[in-house]
Amino acid sequence: MLTDLHAIEVQAHRNNAVTAAEVTAVKSLYGPTTPIDRAAADSLFEIDRVTLRGACDPGWPPVFLTLLVRHLLGPKPTETALSPGSAAWLVDQVHAGGRMTRTGIALVVHIAATARGLPPSFNGFVLSTLRETVSEGGVIGDRDCEAVMRVVYGPGGAAGNRIDRAEADFLFDLNDATTGRENCPAWRALFVEAISAFLLEDPKSPGVVDSEESDWLVGHCGRDRKIDGNERALLSYLRRHASTMPPKLVKLLDGLNIR
């Protein structure tokens, strides 16, 4: 049995794999309440980077996630904000291997969806990471959709559990990048629900699409010179649920035969 984290790290790199043996060894070192210091967290990332080129036991991701969340957010993650220093360290670590591991991406998403608060720069990093990940895949699958939902509705964003402008822009970016593809069925529902919430749950103009929001909406729907099915569904929802909207938006919807 390996008895220290450095030895586990060395063995994983030597074997070019994170096997069940390494997973069991890590679990034996860290019980449910054992603190995870920065040196241990660094080593856990070094072990995880092996998965960029080698095999990964299914038991590794949950162990890695549990221990790194404990390191970054402590024993009560939903009550703890991610500090700027920890955020900077995490960004450096997930990029250290030249590209991010799936486990690293999952950690970033989990932190964004769980922490009570995030530094603004880290929130932008999370959205950028998901944008790149989805764009590279070219399609929004079930796991992608779940990750997006957890991030935009997570408490750590600038608007807390509400959708903010950066998140709404991000959702349109994803939609444009994957329009016409076989996205999972849940994507349309998430896109319509989240953008509608951004517009209709705005504290400054609740239930209303005001002039500024109308300009933003038209600019995003028309920026790729076509209105796709998801955008039509969004516009139809807004027409039916907004108490008022500017005449120019009503005219556009009439022209598109959106009721």
Image (cartoon, grey):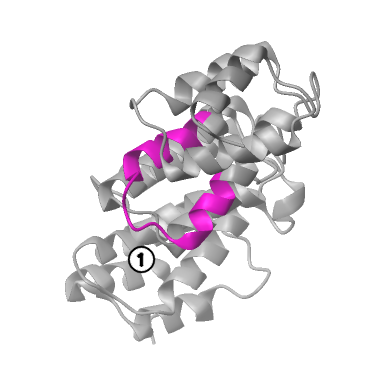
Could you tell me which secondary element the residue under label 1 belongs to? helix
Q: Is residue 111 visible?
A: no
Q: Return the residue nearer the eye: 72 or 52.
A: 52
Q: What residue type is labelled 1?
A: His
Query: Which residue is painted at 54% across and 39% down in the image?
Result: 86
- Residue pointed to by mark 1: 6
- Quadrant that contains the N terminus: bottom left
Residue 24 vs 94, above or below: the answer is below
Q: Return the residue nearer the eye: 22 or 227.
A: 227
- Quadrant that contains the C terminus: top right
Magenta residues?
169-191
Residue 256 vs 215, above or below: the answer is below
* Residue 179 is inside the magenta segment: yes
Q: Find residue 240 and report its horizontal and vertical position in percent.
A: 71, 38
Query: Which residue is painted at 22% across and 68% down in the image?
Result: 13
Residue 37 vs 83, above or below: the answer is below
Side (left or right) of 180 relative to 149: left
Side (left or right) of 209 relative to 243: left
Query: Which quarter of the picture shows residue 19?
Result: bottom left
Query: Which residue is painted at 62% across and 42% down in the image?
Result: 194
Query: Which residue is painted at 54% across and 45% down in the image?
Result: 191
Q: Return the residue nearer the eye: 222 or 240.
A: 240
